[in-house]
Image (cartoon, grey):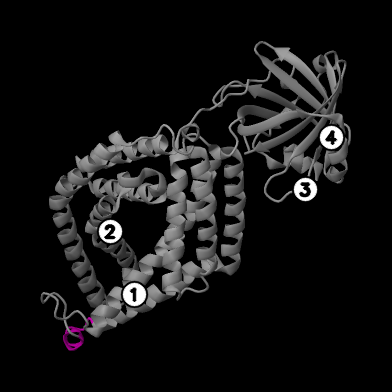
Amino acid sequence: MAKRHPHLLDQSTVQAARRIAAGYLKDAASALTRIRDPKDHDALHNFRVAVRHLRSLLRAYRPWLGSVGGRKVRRRLRKLTRLTGAGRDAEVQIEWLELQRRHLDARERNGLDWLIRRLRARRQLVYRTARKKIGRDFERVAQMLRDRIESAEGGHSKGFRDAFCGLVQLQGREFEQRLGALASADDVEAAHQARIGTKRLRYLVEPLRAQLPEARAVIKSLKRLQDRLGKLHDMHVLESEIARVAEGAAAGKAGRLHALARERRRDRRPGLVAIAARARMHRKELFNELGRSGLRKCRRELAAQIGELLAVAMRSDGTVEFERKYLLKAMPPMARSVRVQEIEQGWLPGKRLRERLRRVRDADGERFYRTIKLGAGVQRLEIEEETTAELFGALWPHTEGCRVRKRRHQVQEGRLTWEIDRFQDRNLVLAEVELTEAGMEAEPPKWLKPYVVREVTVDPAFLNLNLAR
């Protein structure tokens, strides 16, 4: 039946953070073994991701980790990510610039080719330097962290559940404020701060990806937003690069850049001007794709998803149910001869969470329940408790306008119980079966199969809450 899921939330904060940090160290070390291979283009990226996650973890849980994530450790980790930052920027810029070639004339391509050569040289220099230094520098800080993690006392620290939920609420509010401050495509600093806030919130939630479906939903939305803000940031960086070159501000740096007069003689300026114009246009298009209304919608959707995540994370007694649902064209004769329950369900008002009240009448009498279900599709989390007739009676009037009535017929088939619901307030018959695990097959039995129209497990139109509206 329902399956409990022990996870990080049941540990102390130090124990959980120590476990997560150890995983990031392992990921970084694994990528490090591949970094010296110049053909392995993903190694440096994977290393950067692991170190960024580690930095974010130590920053967020610093009040509980103490010296484990001390200033010296965080400073060294920041230095490691900066070693490859300019190379990563050059990589992204080169990719975008190559796509612009077909939009430029022959004269403008002179400036394009010069800029691409310049960026390729920078990328090569940065990555060559990084490959030489990263191994040595990382091993020093990694050993320091391992020693501190091993000696950290975590048995009596605050529970990870409370710490995690508090941080999600705090960073969620900060994220909303930063996103709300982004008003136009020209807000360079606001766009940067919104991107940073998105990344921090995503990194905070990611350790629970494998254990909570609600975490995966939040991460997916944040990743989509982060990608959009990242592209906006990349255009800001490229425009700044072109401006520095065109103004000759860096002409004296190691003789690598040329002054504006020399750019004119070599006919590169038209290309730089054209590229800058295209970058500016692309930046505005990126922002328009989001738009003020899009940003507000994104904030609302994420607020709802974060609310669902917190509702699950705050409760230690939730159970995960796995079920499949089918639309039927009529009542199967087999279902008419079995035990029947009369069910009334109503939902209390709410924006992010909807609590369901349920009255069940059968041969054993009358019972009352309060339930919260989160998620959609095959796997959902359910929190339910039986309540009193008095409390039910007090709350039931508030469900007016959002109710359903149905007769439930329960048919036992091997280890599974098939529930056939015939709705009393509309012409609708549904069949549900609760599974013991998410990947379990649920082939309708012979007595049911002729009546199945289609599976509607992931169709929101057949959620009871939506049917009640």
**What is the CA distance from the residue labelled 2 to the residue labelled 1?**
16 Å
Expressed as whole percent of the image width and height from the top left, the position of residue 175 reads: 51, 59
Taking the spot 31% from the left edge, 67% from the top edge, the residue there is 97
Instruction: Report the mark closest to the observer, 2 or 3.
Output: 3
Name the secondary structure under disc 1.
helix
**What is the CA distance from the residue labelled 4 to the residue labelled 2?**
59 Å
Q: Is residue 65 above or below residue 247?
A: above
**What is the CA distance from the residue labelled 1 to the residue labelled 3?**
49 Å
For the residue marked with disc 4, what is the amino acid?
Phe
Instruction: Please tell me how crowded label 1 is: few (under 14), some (14-19), or many (20+) other residues with Cα within 10 Å.
Output: many
Instruction: Please tell me how crowded label 2 is: few (under 14), some (14-19), or many (20+) other residues with Cα within 10 Å.
Output: some
For residue 327, say whether it is visible: no
Taking the spot 18% from the left edge, 45% from the top edge, the residue there is 140
Q: Is residue 145 above or below residue 406?
A: below
The residue under label 1 is 239
Q: Tell me, yes or no, whether the highlighted magenta stretch contains residue 265.
A: yes
For the residue marked with disc 1, what is the amino acid?
Glu
- What stretch of residues is rendered in magenta? 260-268
Q: Which mark is residue 88?
A: 2
Q: Which mark is residue 392?
A: 4
First-in-chain label (4 vs 2): 2
Would you say 455 lies left or right of 54 here? right
Instruction: Report the mark closest to the observer, 3 or 4.
Output: 4
Would you say 424 lies left or right of 221 here? right
